[in-house]
Image (cartoon, rainbow, N blue to C red):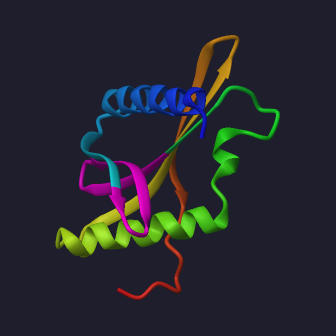
Amino acid sequence: MSKQDLYLGKKGEEIAVGLLKENGYKILIRNYKTKLGEIDIIASDKDTICFIEVKTRQSDRFGLPSEAISGSKQRQISKVALMFLKEKGLLDKKARFDVVSILYSKDKPQVDLIKNAFELDNDFVY
């Protein structure tokens, strides 16, 4: 990944954190990493634990940022989320997967918060 891509990703995460706080989320952890993968932001929204993927793009040439979260990426995020819930003893809590999509148009970001962007795969076993 290029330095420019890393910078864009970090900038996108900062924008996402601001948006989430404005919408009443409490940020719990940023960049939660395990051997299975990473979740950009873990937050609480009232009584729900939210696992948030941030996607930032400079153009829509290859589609919208939110469209870059493939089925395999969703499964990976789900596995990491389950690991977090087990590790913290939170399997009894409500949880969901949100996406913050950031698309730069003429250096101005268009930011969208997508709640319940995808569901936990039914094949998972706790």
Q: Nearer the viewer, residue 113 or 14?
A: 14
Instruction: Give me the residue at 40% from left, 27% from top.
Output: 14
Magenta-colored span: 33-53
> Which quarter of the rendered picture does the C terminus lie within?
bottom left
Q: Residue furthest left?
A: 89
* Image position of 61 with respect to 115: above or below: above
Instruction: Give me the residue at 46% from left, 57% from top.
Output: 97
- The quadrant where residue 125 appears: bottom left
Q: Point out residue 30 in the picture as x, y percentages from the top left corner.
A: 31, 44
* Image position of 27 with respect to 95: above or below: above
Q: Point out residue 103 in the picture as x, y percentages from the top left corner.
A: 64, 28
Instruction: Give me the residue at 25% from left, 75% from top.
Output: 86
* Image position of 16 with respect to 72: above or below: above
> Which quarter of the rendered picture does the N terminus lie within?
top right
- The quadrant where residue 70 appears: bottom right
Instruction: Give me the residue at 32% from left, 72% from top.
Output: 83
- The quadrant where residue 25 appears: top left
Q: Point out residue 34 in the picture as x, y percentages from the top left corner.
A: 35, 64
Magenta stretch: residue 44 in it?
A: yes
Q: Point out residue 124 in the picture as x, y percentages from the top left corner.
A: 46, 84
Q: Nearer the viewer, residue 7 or 12?
A: 7
